[in-house]
């Protein structure tokens, strides 16, 4: 996509404005370029290239919905322009309108089957749709037309990364770097793949390579900080987060992660201050309210904790472990139904989340739904057979239900894993007493016919002698 300027043999006012817009665009002054283009369009609204240029400028400042409207106007004036169609399809993908994007790319293919960008950029759309076979098909179609397209290798690398095929993703991104050494953030993407694949040494190398080329990229600095934090290099991580704040003083994410370091160092006063500062900068940022809720619970402020959690719940979350953790806090507060909703969302996202099923069992038991509790604990143990908590708590549920043999089996398994701790000994004693009571009752029940016969004979004997 290139900002177009059509120069004619004379300058009208509109053309002078369009030319000025081009110069401003090249200089990175997007708001001013938009102002100049708007004047040109008001003078001559029938110039499709100016609407196209305005859309490109809007794209440069991430105003994709506004850009789509300009592309659509440009297409009304020039319906079969491949560049406009391609740019429009890309923005449909950016805004999650995948069906419209695919339709537009297919229309381009009908107009010109040799137009390589319609295959190259469709890789992104299919990757976003989680249709990776189709993404690979687009890659191979694009290769037939332009075998050395750096962007194609980059896009298919993204598809491979999403699927967890990190080594293949690295191979594709290295090919991108060979074909286009200045491709934006290419070392960053390679670093992320090595990091995800557990190769921290190479991950660090590529993070540093990216920062040598782009020392002011705050997103890379932030992610490198997270990399260092995960590696246990706390001081270096702090340096990166503080560096990000120097470059972008109101960077909410950097404030949050500095708060995380303070929180995990038990410097709760500083952590709370940083979390609140992060929220002041970005009240939609996931995480600060979650930590503030934890701190409120630790301080015994259950209602304050609940308020933070409810606010956090309004932010869309797709992390099953975080959902389980939030649900467990609602359990502590005593809001079992709210907690249950979180656990259900967690196991819906990740059906192999043993903690989600364990806490569903706990919540069901608290609500007196013991059959459901036993089933959920069973799911947790299918996934994690050595979970002593699930073994112990399912034994309690079985004891409550009168399924004493099942309770005894679970206790034996828990003892084999954790030894005979106090809780298990008390539970084992309760089960044994219940089993003894059951045997006595069963014994007396079996004696019942003999007792009735004995009682009847005595009654008859008594009647004869009276």
Image (cartoon, rainbow, N blue to C red):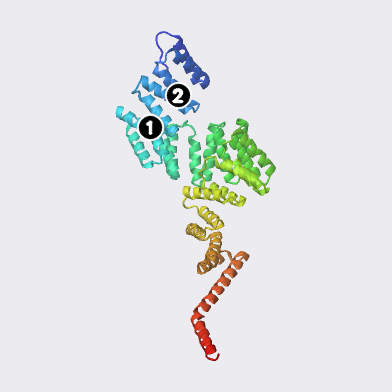
Kindly identify the residue that appears in the image at 57 percent across and 45 percent down. 230
Visible residue check, residue 120 = no
Where residue 52 appears, as percent x and y from the top left, is: 42, 21
Give the mark nearer the N terminus: 2 vs 1. Answer: 2
In the rendered image, the quadrant that contains the C terminus is: bottom right
Above-or-below relation of 465 to 262: below
Residue 56 shows which numbered tag?
2
Q: CA distance from mark 2 to mark 1?
A: 19 Å
Nearer to me, 179 or 463: 463
Residue at label 1? 100
Visible residue check, residue 34 = yes
Kindly identify the residue that appears in the image at 41 percent across and 39 percent down. 129
Provide the secondary structure element on which disc 1 rests: helix
Provide the secondary structure element on which disc 2 rests: helix
Residue 93 figure quarter: top left
Above-or-below relation of 423 to 68: below
Where residue 68 appears, as percent x and y from the top left, is: 43, 26
Nearer to me, 220 or 35: 35
Residue 244 figure quarter: top right
In the rendered image, the quadrant that contains the N terminus is: top left
């Amino acid at each position: 996509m290139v900002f177009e300027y059509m120069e004619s043999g004379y300058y009208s006012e509109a053309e002078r404005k369009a030319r000025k817009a081009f110069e401003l665009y090249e200089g990175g002054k997007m708001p001013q370029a938009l102002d100049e283009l708007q004047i040109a369009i008001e003078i001559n609204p029938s110039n499709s290239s100016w609407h196209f240029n305005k859309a490109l400028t809007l794209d440069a400042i991430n105003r994709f919905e506004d850009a789509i409207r300009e592309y659509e106007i440009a297409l009304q004036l020039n319906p079969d322009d491949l560049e406009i169609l391609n740019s429009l399809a890309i923005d449909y993908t950016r805004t999650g309108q995948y069906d419209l994007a695919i339709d537009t790319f297919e229309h381009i293919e009908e107009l010109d089957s040799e137009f390589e960008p319609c295959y190259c950029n469709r890789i992104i759309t299919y990757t976003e749709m989680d249709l990776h076979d189709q993404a690979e098909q687009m890659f191979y179609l694009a290769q037939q037309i332009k075998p050395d397209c750096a962007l194609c290798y980059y896009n298919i690398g993204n598809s491979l990364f999403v699927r967890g095929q990190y080594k293949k993703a690295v191979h594709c991104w290295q090919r991108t770097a060979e074909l286009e050494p200045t491709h934006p953030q290419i070392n960053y993407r390679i670093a992320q793949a090595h990091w995800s694949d557990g190769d921290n040494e190479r991950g660090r190398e590529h993070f540093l390579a990216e920062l040598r080329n782009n020392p002011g990229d705050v997103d890379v600095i932030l992610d490198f900080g997270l990399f260092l934090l995960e590696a246990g290099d706390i001081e270096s991580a702090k340096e990166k987060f503080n560096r990000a704040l120097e470059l972008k003083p109101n960077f909410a994410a950097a404030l949050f992660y500095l708060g995380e370091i303070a929180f995990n160092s038990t410097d709760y006063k500083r952590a709370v201050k940083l979390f609140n500062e992060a929220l002041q900068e970005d009240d939609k940022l996931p995480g600060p309210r979650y930590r503030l809720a934890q701190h409120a619970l630790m301080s015994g402020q259950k209602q304050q904790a609940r308020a933070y959690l409810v606010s956090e719940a309004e932010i869309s979350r797709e992390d099953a472990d975080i959902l389980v953790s939030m649900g467990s806090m609602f359990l502590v507060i005593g809001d079992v139904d709210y907690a249950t909703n979180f656990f259900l969302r967690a196991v819906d996202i990740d059906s192999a989340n043993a903690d989600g099923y364990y806490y569903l069992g706990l919540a069901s038991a608290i609500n007196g739904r013991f059959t459901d509790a036993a089933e959920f604990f069973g799911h947790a143990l299918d996934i994690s057979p050595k979970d002593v908590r699930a073994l112990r708590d399912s034994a309690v549920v079985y004891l409550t239900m009168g399924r004493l043999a099942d309770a005894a089996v679970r206790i034996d398994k828990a003892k084999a894993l954790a030894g005979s701790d106090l809780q298990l000994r008390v539970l084992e004693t309760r089960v044994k007493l219940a089993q003894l009571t059951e045997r006595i009752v069963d014994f007396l029940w079996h004696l019942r016919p003999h007792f009735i016969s004995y009682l009847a004979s005595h009654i008859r004997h008594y009647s004869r002698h009276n």
